[in-house]
């Protein structure tokens, strides 16, 4: 099929199935409001066109896949390019056992199941391989006990992608298994987790004797770490680091001159100390943008770029330093909160939520390890627990 | 100083026992969600211990302590995050009445402040809120036998729970201090990011007031009260900093990742070492300022300005680092770290910013030349 | 831009080969101790390669390159710590003559600058040395057929080795650019902390001078030349920063203490991670400034000011951290780290401080509003 | 003997032996210009009064020793209190073998021998136990080969206190030995070490087949680390951290307002940004002084103080930040050096010499380890080489 034929076919499909100007609110935690349309996209082979024909795809090249995506984007239609963007479906398609795969992947590609991630635990944050949620075999099922945290969308989810321990007598990375855990069952207690920002975007999930069919395991027993790594890689490629940024100030000026404008509004723009700080923080922002542009240009030329990994660390510095500057601009006003004091609300929110970036998804300290080791090739920290049977690993 | 070293230590021990028993984290969380923002029963015990009258002269029912005792008392209060109008009533108002030299008013008002039965506060800055003389935005005019006030005062701490307002206002013959019944004032409560704090903006419109006589110029008396408040806040910051620091070091020893206590990783260990310097410097600065103020030393303004910015910055920096070092758990409401950060951010504004205090400090250095 | 991408890469490769062969650390150390402070033989080869005429128009014997090419060339020069009058002659003087629009002078002077046979420099600031128009401290008065200059110019780079001086001076009708024979000027060589640098203070006393005609106001031409110099220095800083950073990472892999490469310790590893951000940001800033200047973009002043302080600070910070990360060995004269620190400290002053450039940057942001 | 009797005796001794107003230039690298007087001090039992009578002392209490020191100090006379201050004599008296001890200690106490420290090596800086200078037994001697660095006074020294390796088959700390190495012999080549400040206060010492009698060993073979630790403890108690500071600006204003005065001279005092920095740096200095005063007060009350160990780290920050501020005050003038530009010379010297404090005597990084581990009780870094035979330890 030529590119032109493919484009023509796509356009014809869209003309037949997607009203011009129709809007889609998009996927959230696996569910999509336009499931019926997505079913037609799937049936037409546009959902995951680079996958093989026997697996919901058409065996197209990545370049042809992008052509389809472009047409869908132009029409404002959802559902194309899920071979690049659907974390859940990619993970299941790559690792699920045949029967469950056949069952779940179409549901995921048509946005018919709610999903959540059951990865972090109170005792396993930076050290994800140290999870202690356990899965014990019982007939055709596994019985799950443990606690997960920092989960989004857990209350409404049909399945959670769960990493847990099935073998305690092998080293930590080797005793893990990965499941699609049915969430709507009695043993699962989802509680909102109140953040320091006084929001609750996340949950704690307490799991007590919940059951999951052995058929829902992705990979084999003990393969969990490997499956998790591919799932995390999908997640990173889908979300990028930008998605880990905070919701920004709800209002207020935008662009490179935003801090200048804020200072002007605060009557502080003529303060030479403030001006120096505006320059510093604005520079951090612009430099991060320039770095990312260089990284993209390098990658477009097929070169790997060390800069890509710097974005999260840079963003952390930007957020914390901007929060400090905004506080300085406000002076005593920064003591206030509430809707009547939006600037203070912004500054205080930013001050607290900056930790979402500097802690969440790997602390700045872990991030510096990664940069030092993977980008610069510096030696790894000695891993005292890497070869120990997990039972013997110190915890606390 | 009316108190000996041993007596002082016993006094502090009693104070710390009271705080440990009645102002644990759960108490702070409960009290900060109440409208009044402090525990009246505990306030009575605080008063019974002599804390509310710590800097009030013995002839007015106080303990007769000075800046050094105040600083130590506030270290313990800061460590416990005590929510109370102590700073407003027992320090600012008591300090102002003590400094002003109106014997009648002192005799009439200080005993109630000292025994905790009267909660007072001081309205001393206008909306520009730099707590400097220029910013006073209330005017006073004679009216009948007394005075009446017009204008606005900003960020008046604990105004809503005060039984007595002392208002700094511009009279035709210069700045004065006025006694006002809070019930006669329009009070706009300000929602505070530090939920253990209560503040309000006040509006005066022909509000009746009694002028206090002053043996010294009103702003001099205000500065004397503010200096006590600065030392008190520095003490609070030192105590808070140390507590948060210790909490963080304890966590770094207990929390294991990768099979090791995280405090064994240089990233955390080195942050902790730097914070020890921060924490100890904060304590040194606060105690030094208290000692110089108590001694009436010529370099007291320099020492107070130094403590004001050094302790403010140390408390903010330490609480901020503490959250980072704790990781995800300190991103939850349930963890106390953010309560300290909120307090640190409020303390860094009362009663002046670090930038402003650095400027004052350099001015003091210039004069010391 | 007169040069294609492939051609440019080949040009840069040749340039890097020349520097690797003739400007190794030992060469830098040897040359910096000579009175002239540069290697005349190498200068000839630099010229032969087209570097001295990089930004000179082809009709005057140059390559006709612009800011982008200049920035890349300077990255390599900065990495090698090249001691030479390139910045003075090939950038500042060539840039000023190129911008000014005196066709006769350009035709007469630029070919020699381009082929390296004539070394030129620009005297453009007075003793206040902020490289701004206000600071010009040389006056020009008509004398006979020509002009005579009086006053002082400060921090004139490579004045002692220059064959041609371009002097910015105040004439009765405004600022002008004057051609002066260096032999007629009292030159006070300044001992430089960066021993690869040569600078002098100049005194003019009835010094004969020829006024150059200007198609644009003199200070506009000076600013155009300075912008090229700023981009050139930013490139030098980016190259130097990257080289020092790489040197440090290599050392952290090779140096063992406690039976481990020191780069395995988080203290060193995390400093290195932060410096990677510093180093990459520096390169991004320098290249962006060059690109905006080359494009004649409206936001070029903002991009140049950003590069000026960001690259200056990155180079100073990286060299400073590099010494710390190396430990004792970098405290020795024999180790190259301090040579880079010295260069970084000089580059951070030419032609303006980071504080001043931050202020310029904010002004640019204000105007971009 | 009562305190009064002791004071009277000391005064009588001084009256008889030390002319009023006489000045002493003091000890340098072991040598003292007033050796003859020191001999009399030693003979009178004032040199090391707290040592036992059979070991040059009088068995006095520390308090009585201080009384003697106070009288000597009042008279400006040298030589008393060497039980507290003489690093060399203390080390030798504690660890030397009897014959050598009898020979060397009196010479050290009378300032008759030049001394130097042969500790650090190019490959053993932070990790002093990793020294590779070797001592091989040969008859009654040991033969020494290796290289030492950061040595002061080596060229004129009679002896160097040497730490070197005598056993390569045991873990690093266990194979070391400690010698008084005769320095004036052909196998020892002392070269000045040019610093980044263009000074040469230190030497490199190249040792090739130098010989030292086995009788000059302090402690037993393999005791070297223990001996070194006591020598370092003496050194710290003698020198304090202050001694590790730089020579300060050669001229210029002193006291808390020094930076204000410098800024005034530079015409920068009215710059608000500069004023903020003056406050910051001056605060570091004052706070360090206040911390030290608190530490001393705590220690005077018999309490150990965590603050004492912070001084070096604090000083490092003071020096680096003051150097940066001075550079800022000077602007382009900071590009200059030489006697005609003393302010620039100071700023540049301070910039470079700050590393003497942040690297020398343990880098800031090592210092933070020490504070974290010894003061705060945080766990030690895993020591991969601690139990390995030294031959197998990775080096580079």
Image (tube, coloured by chain):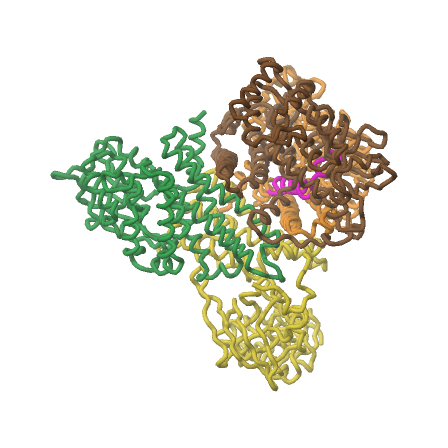
Chain colours: A brown, B orange, C green, D yellow
Residue D150 position in % (x across, y down): 52, 66
Magenta region: which residues? B310-334
Please state the horizontal and vertical placement of residue C27, each as a whole percent of the image: 36, 59
Q: Position of residue D327 (x, y in %)?
A: 44, 48
Q: Is residue A353 above or below residue B209?
A: below
Q: What residue do we see at 77% from left, 27% from top?
A: A158
> Is residue D9 inside the magenta stretch?
no
Apparent side of residue C362 relative to residue B105 in the rendered image (left or right): left
Residue D182 screen position, x and y as percent: 54, 80
Q: Is residue A55 above or below residue C185?
A: above
Q: Residue furthest left?
A: C144
Question: Is B315 within the magenta?
Answer: yes
The residue sitting at the right extreme is: A139
Q: Work out which residue is located at the far front of the displayed protein and give it.
A: A1
Say which quadrant the N terminus of chain B sits in.
top right
Q: Nearer the viewer, residue C61 or A56?
A: A56
Count the marks.
Answer: 0
Residue D331 visible in this rendered orientation of the protein: no
State the image quarter where residue C38 is shown: bottom left
Please tell me which residue is depicted at 43% across the width and 30% down the height of the picture. Answer: C363
Nearer to me, A323 or A220: A220
Q: Residue furthest bottom?
A: D139
Q: Nearer the viewer, residue C84 or A24?
A: A24
- Magenta region, main secondary structure: helix
Q: In this rendering, does residue A48 appear at all? A: yes
Question: In the rendered view, would you say D5 is above or below B282?
Answer: below
Task: Give the camera-side residue of C200 and B291.
Answer: C200
């Amino acid at each position: 099929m030529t590119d032109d034929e493919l484009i023509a076919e796509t356009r014809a499909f869209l003309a037949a199935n997607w009203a011009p100007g129709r809007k889609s609110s998009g996927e959230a935690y696996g569910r999509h409001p336009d499931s019926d349309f997505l079913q037609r996209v799937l049936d037409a082979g546009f959902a995951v066109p680079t996958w093989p024909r026997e697996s919901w795809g058409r065996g197209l090249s990545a370049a042809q896949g992008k052509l389809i995506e472009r047409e869908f984007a132009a029409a404002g239609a959802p559902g194309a390019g899920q071979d690049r963007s659907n974390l859940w479906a990619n993970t299941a398609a790559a690792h699920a056992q045949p029967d469950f795969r056949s069952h779940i992947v179409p549901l995921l590609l048509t946005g018919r199941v709610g999903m959540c991630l059951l990865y972090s635990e109170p005792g396993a944050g930076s050290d994800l391989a140290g999870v202690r949620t356990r899965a014990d075999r019982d007939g055709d099922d596994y019985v799950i006990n443990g606690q997960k945290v920092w989960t989004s969308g857990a209350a409404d989810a049909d399945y959670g992608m769960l990493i847990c321990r099935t073998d305690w007598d092998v080293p930590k990375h080797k005793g893990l298994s990965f499941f699609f855990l049915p969430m709507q069952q009695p043993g699962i207690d989802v509680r909102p987790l109140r953040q320091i920002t006084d929001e609750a975007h996340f949950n704690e999930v307490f799991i007590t004797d919940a059951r999951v069919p052995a058929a829902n395991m992705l990979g084999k027993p003990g393969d969990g770490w490997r499956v998790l790594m591919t799932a995390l890689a999908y997640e990173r490629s889908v979300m990028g680091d930008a998605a880990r940024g905070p919701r920004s100030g709800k209002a207020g000026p935008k662009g490179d001159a935003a801090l200048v404008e804020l200072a002007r509004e605060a009557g502080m723009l003529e303060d030479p100390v403030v001006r120096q700080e505006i320059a510093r923080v604005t520079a951090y922002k612009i430099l991060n943008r320039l770095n990312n542009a260089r990284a993209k240009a390098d990658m477009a030329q097929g070169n790997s770029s060390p800069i890509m990994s710097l974005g999260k660390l840079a963003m952390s510095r930007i957020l914390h330093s901007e929060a400090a500057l905004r506080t300085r601009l406000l002076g005593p006003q920064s003591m206030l909160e509430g809707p009547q004091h939006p600037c203070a609300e912004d500054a205080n929110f930013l001050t607290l939520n900056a930790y979402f970036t500097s802690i969440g998804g790997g602390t700045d300290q872990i991030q510096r390890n990664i940069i030092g080791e993977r980008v610069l090739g510096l030696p790894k920290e000695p891993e005292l627990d890497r070869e120990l049977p997990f039972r013997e690993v110190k915890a606390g | 100083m009316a108190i000996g070293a041993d007596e002082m230590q016993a006094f502090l021990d009693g104070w710390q026992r009271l705080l440990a028993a009645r102002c644990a984290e759960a108490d702070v969380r409960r009290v900060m969600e109440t409208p009044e923002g402090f525990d009246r029963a505990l306030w009575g015990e605080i008063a019974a211990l002599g804390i509310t009258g710590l800097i009030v002269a013995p002839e007015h029912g106080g303990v007769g302590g000075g800046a050094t005792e105040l600083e130590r008392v506030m270290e313990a209060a800061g460590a416990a995050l005590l929510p109370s109008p102590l700073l407003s009533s027992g320090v600012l108002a008591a300090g102002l009445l003590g400094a002003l030299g109106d014997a009648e008013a002192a005799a009439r008002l200080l005993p109630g402040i000292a025994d905790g039965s009267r909660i007072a506060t001081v309205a001393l800055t206008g909306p520009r809120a730099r707590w400097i003389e220029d910013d006073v935005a209330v005017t006073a005019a004679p009216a009948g036998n007394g005075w009446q006030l017009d204008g606005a005062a900003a960020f008046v701490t604990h105004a809503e729970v005060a039984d007595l307002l002392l208002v700094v206002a511009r009279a035709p013959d210069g700045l004065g201090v006025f006694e006002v019944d809070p019930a006669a004032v329009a009070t706009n409560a300000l929602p505070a990011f530090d939920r253990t704090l209560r503040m309000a903006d006040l509006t005066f419109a022909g509000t009746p007031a009694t002028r206090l006589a002053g043996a010294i110029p009103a702003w001099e008396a205000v500065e004397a009260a503010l200096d006590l408040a600065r030392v008190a806040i520095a003490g609070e910051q030192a105590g808070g900093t140390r507590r948060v620091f210790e909490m963080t070091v304890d966590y770094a020893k207990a929390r294991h990742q990768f099979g090791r206590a995280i405090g064994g990783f240089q990233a955390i260990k080195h942050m902790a070492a730097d914070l020890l310097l921060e924490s100890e410097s904060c304590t040194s600065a606060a105690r030094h300022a208290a000692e110089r103020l108590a001694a009436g030393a010529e370099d007291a303004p320099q020492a107070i300005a130094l403590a004001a910015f050094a302790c403010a910055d140390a408390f903010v920096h330490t609480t901020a680092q503490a959250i980072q070092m704790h990781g995800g758990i300190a991103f939850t409401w349930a963890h106390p770290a953010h309560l300290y950060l909120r307090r640190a951010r409020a303390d860094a504004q009362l009663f002046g910013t670090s930038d402003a205090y650095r400027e004052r400090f350099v001015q003091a250095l210039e004069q010391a030349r």
